[in-house]
Amino acid sequence: MVSLNVLSCAGLKRRLLSLVCIFFLAPLLIQAQEAQKQAVPQKDILDQVYRLMNKTRKETHPEDLKKKKNISIVPAIGYTLQTGFAAILSGNLAFYTDTSAAAKMSVISSSITYSQYNQIIVPIQFNVWADGDAWNIITDFRYIKYPSDIYGLGGPADPAVGYTVDFSGIKFHQTVLRKVKGKVYAGLGYYYDKFYNIHPSASLSPEIADQVTTVMGTREEASGIVGRFLFDNRINPINS
């Protein structure tokens, strides 16, 4: 029993010594890693292009970056259950309305999507900061032409079978926010949504088509004034 206790105490001492080493050495390792990160300059794809062309890229000072407008356009291919495969062309414009170090980046973004099921989706979104970030102007406009399947019509319709309904839609949400304190903003907005040209697919039977029209109608609209609160501590909303 005595020998077991001695071994247990020795093992406990080794574990305690290991914990103490980790406790004191971990901050030093973290500092070394941070120093290494700072020592290695960051590079982007343009840096690599200049390197391949054996050219030197002109250095840009931080204050000059605030004056530039950055545009990006990216094609893509996506897939969802609702759209199937889709071809996408997206782009955004990033800029600053203030050259101060703490100024937030304003962004205008949009895309065009055409899907396997003949769906068209076009969003246009503004997130603009003004007057030293005292104001935040948010616009969300979307157009959709969105044939899709619906379920649960009731009556003679089979609840397990989807029936294709085509419709178009417009969404316009506009909000203006004012800084309250720190990173907190509050304001008012106007939201408008409209679905129109709602009609059943030509492939549906007349009985089901009449039921779709009776249940869904041919158009729907909704609008109203909204209040909104926002906490935003981001400087760059694209990379956040």
Image (tube, rainbow, N blue to C red):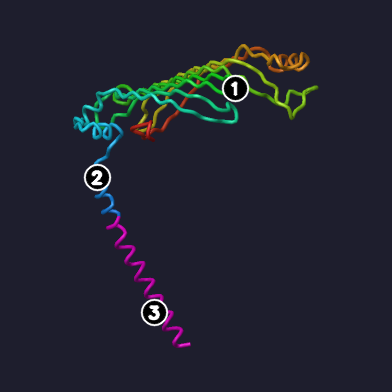
The span from disc 1 to disc 3 (Cα, nearest Å) is 71 Å
- Residue carrying label 2: 40
Inspect the magenta stretch and tell me whether residue 18 lies in it: yes
Front-most of 42 and 49?
49
Residue 10: which disc? 3
Q: Earlier in the sequence, mark 2 or mark 1?
A: 2
Residue 117: which disc? 1
How many labels were placed on the picture? 3
Inspect the magenta stretch and tell me whether residue 49 lies in it: no
Is 44 located above or below residue 176 in the figure?
Answer: below
The span from disc 2 to disc 1 (Cα, nearest Å) is 48 Å
Residue 166: which disc? none
Residue bounds of the magenta highlight = 1-29
Tell me which amino acid carries mark 1: Tyr
Instruction: Say which of marks 2 and 1 sits in front.
Output: 1
Q: Could you tell me residue 9's position as x and y percent?
A: 41, 79
Disc 1 + disc 3, Cβ < 8 Å: no
Q: Could you tell me residue 129's position as x and y percent?
A: 34, 24
- Residue sitting at the far front: 53
Element assignment for label 3: helix
Front-most of 172 and 46?
46
Tell me which amino acid carries mark 3: Ala
Instruction: Residue at 70% x, 22% y: name it.
Output: 163
Is 61 located above or below residue 123 in the figure?
Answer: below
Badge 3 local density, few (<14 within 10 Å), some, or many (20+)?
A: few
Q: Earlier in the sequence, mark 2 or mark 3?
A: 3
